[in-house]
Image (cartoon, rainbow, N blue to C red):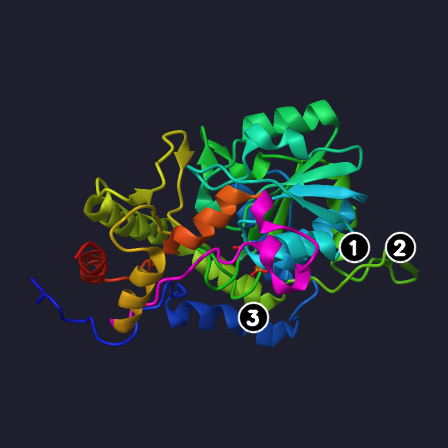
Amino acid sequence: MREKGKNIKGPIAVTRSSLPPLEEYVEMLKPLWESAWLTNMGDYHEELKRQLKIYLKTQNLELFVNGHMALELALQALGLKGEVITTPFSFASTTHAIVRNGLTPVFGDIDPENYTLDAERLEDRITENTCAILPVHVYGNLCDVDRIQEIADRHGLKVIYDAAHTFGEELDGRGVAELGDLSMFSFHATKVFHSIEGGAVSYRDPGLADRLYQLKNFGIMNSESVEYVGANGKMNEFQAAMGLCNLRHIDQEIAKRKRLADHYRKRLSNTEGICLCSENPRVRSNYAYMPVVFDGYKKNRDQVFEELARADIHARKYFYPCINSYACYRGLFDEKETPVAARISRQVLTLPLYAELDPEIVDRICDLILV
Ligand SMILES: *Cc1c(COP(=O)(O)O)cnc(C)c1O
């Protein structure tokens, strides 16, 4: 038994990137020095794509330099015009991708239980200009996907999921990559699975393959023809190599996260004023985040945040503020239109959670919260 309190020195961040054994990565670099093929859809790029299709259980997948670029180019690939209904309770990327495509975001409120776009009230936001719905599987909590699809079908709308938090999750044994018209995954260093920076788009219509591929390569069709106003969204070989290494260990990583998440749950559930997301038995979870909502607890979110910070434990106000109150969108939106999102963003804290986190630190965090 390790002594209580040991190993609790030094700052604890909300997350810490997983790394494969160094030798594994170095081994992967050798062929790159031989071929000198460093980017532009090299062997590792193709191999990662192949393996991810299997892991994510999807037929159609394209890799990108990061998740944001994947989302931005996915929206461009669909050739959308008009309004896109989305959630203000997300990372900046979700709405920025809409705006940077010349589309208009329209914010719907979130479900008070799982914090994803509230499907019940989604239809109120649809106008004759609506072209798509862009919901987010927040913290890995799946959206009400059946309801959203039913509404989208009835109104002829595209559904694009921001699945940045949902790597490897399954619903009734089906990969989440199969949901909607398109899903975007992020492989950023802070995510459950990463390629340092990186991302992917899974898609239903195989007809999108060429367009997605060309859009991430400046819209170049062939050496003499440029068909689209594309961007540079290519994943390079060093990223793909990291992805391939990390993919070998992903199931153990998720298992470690699960143990820690269960530990948090055991300590924090059944405490008046502390709300944890309920677990959905239909979903194979990836335990990406440990969100806790303080609603009527003896301490509010900001107090808990400060107390943890004084102990050099750095939780994250994620997501705060809501996107519809960002300075860059000032005057365009009103956070009051999405009161649930506004409230949750002031009550939520994501606690440190990563595979190598010491369970003793989980106890220490819970002690600090519960005292
Ligand atoms: C991480 C993240 C993104 C952006 O992904 P990057 O790979 O960092 O570009 C988009 N949406 C959400 C919800 C995210 O958490």
Question: Label 3 vs label 2: CA separation?
Answer: 33 Å
Question: Label 2 vs label 1: CA separation?
Answer: 8 Å
Q: Earlier in the sequence, mark 3 or mark 2?
A: 3
Quarter that holds the N terminus:
bottom left
Res. 230 image quadrant = bottom right
Q: Which residue is mark 3?
A: 31
Residues drawn in magenta? 311-337
Q: Is residue 339 magenta?
A: no
Q: Residues within 10 Å of mark 2 (few under 14, many from 20)?
A: some
Q: Residues within 10 Å of mark 3 (few under 14, many from 20)?
A: few
Task: Estimate the x, y position of residue 206 in percent, counting from the top left.
Answer: 72, 37
Q: Which residue is mark 2?
A: 227
Residue at 58% x, 77% y is 33
Please state which of the two labelled residues, at mark 1 or mark 3, is closer to the viewer: 1
Q: Which residue is mark 1?
A: 214
Label for residue 178?
none
**Count of numbered labels shown in the rendering:** 3
Q: Are marks 2 and 1 in contact (CB under 8 Å)?
A: yes
Quarter that holds the C terminus:
bottom left
Task: Estimate the x, y position of residue 222 in percent, counting from the top left.
Answer: 86, 58
